[in-house]
Image: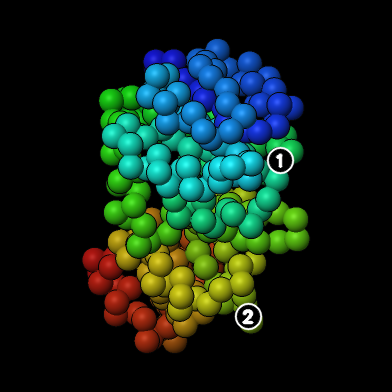
Amino acid sequence: MNKIKVLIVDDEALARINIREALEPYENWQVVGELNNGKELFSVVEQTRPTVIFLDIQMPGANGMELAEKLMDEDQCPQIIFVTAYDEYAVNAFELCAFDYLLKPFDDERFMKTIQRLESSLTQTNDQISMKRWQKRQINSAQYLDKILIRSIGSIRIIAVDDVYSFHSCGNYVEVHHLEGMHLHRVSLSFLETKLAPEDFCRVHRSAIVKLSEVKELKILDDNSHQLVLSNEVVVKVSAAYRTRFFDRLGL
């Protein structure tokens, strides 16, 4: 893999130092520039052609969100990782197709996950696909969710849809069952159904949506009702109202 070139943009000197020091263990990452505001951002991007920009949001005279939106118009737009102390911008950040969103102060483990995800993304594209083309693909598929953002006091949990097994109604919430456990999300199941890629997910009950690739077993019970066993061993009922569509999706 070629060197991953990094530009750090933050008005706080200590924040820039923290990012630079956090990158030191990663030999393949190279800091090619640091800015304390967005005034020279576009000229520096043109000169250095960074792979990724660590971008603060609230800076004097420049808003990181506005800068990111303008960067999207560049022919070779870098990946953008927002680094901020404010969690209220997270949803807008991902709508802009930001690669990640780090809340200050972040820990080593959270930072490492971001680094590994970006390296994996670059490896999968063989470093030949420009960041702009990657982001256009993200925008074109933005009608469907690729992340679930779950707000709680003082944090936002980010769950990749690829890691989800199933969704289940639970009062005014939806249970999101995923690789790392279960979290409650205050949203309706019907809304989620419209935001999930239909080739990947299927509603099987008024209270459940499952990922088709996680269905391990289909059980036919004595009363001719049906149950699914998912790869995480969760059992889900298949109701008569959704059975035909589900069977069609499985090719039965």
Residue 171 sits in quarter:
bottom right
Tell me the tag on residue 27.
none
| x and y, in percent, of residue 110 in the image | 65, 37
Q: Residues within 10 Å of mark 2 (few under 14, many from 20)?
A: few
Q: Is mark 1 on a helix, strand or loop?
A: loop
| x and y, in percent, of residue 131 in the image | 35, 34
> In percent of the image, x 63 and y 41: which residue is there?
59
Q: Which of 210 and 50 is in front in this view?
A: 50
Q: Which of marks 2 and 1 is nearer the N terminus?
A: 1
Residue 135 sits in quarter:
top left
Tell me the tag on residue 104.
1
> In percent of the image, x 69 and y 23: which residue is there?
17
Left or right: 139, with 158 as reference point: left
Q: What residue type is labelled 1?
A: Lys
Q: Which of 101 and 10 is in front in this view?
A: 10
Q: Which amino acid does label 2 sit on?
A: Asn
Q: Determine the CA span between mark 2 and mark 1.
A: 31 Å
Q: Which of 19 and 171 is in front in this view?
A: 19
| x and y, in percent, of residue 50 in the image | 43, 24
Which quarter of the rendering shows the N terminus? top left
> In percent of the image, x 51 and y 48: which residue is there?
65
- Image height of 185 relative to 137, above or below: below
Residue assigned mark 2: 172
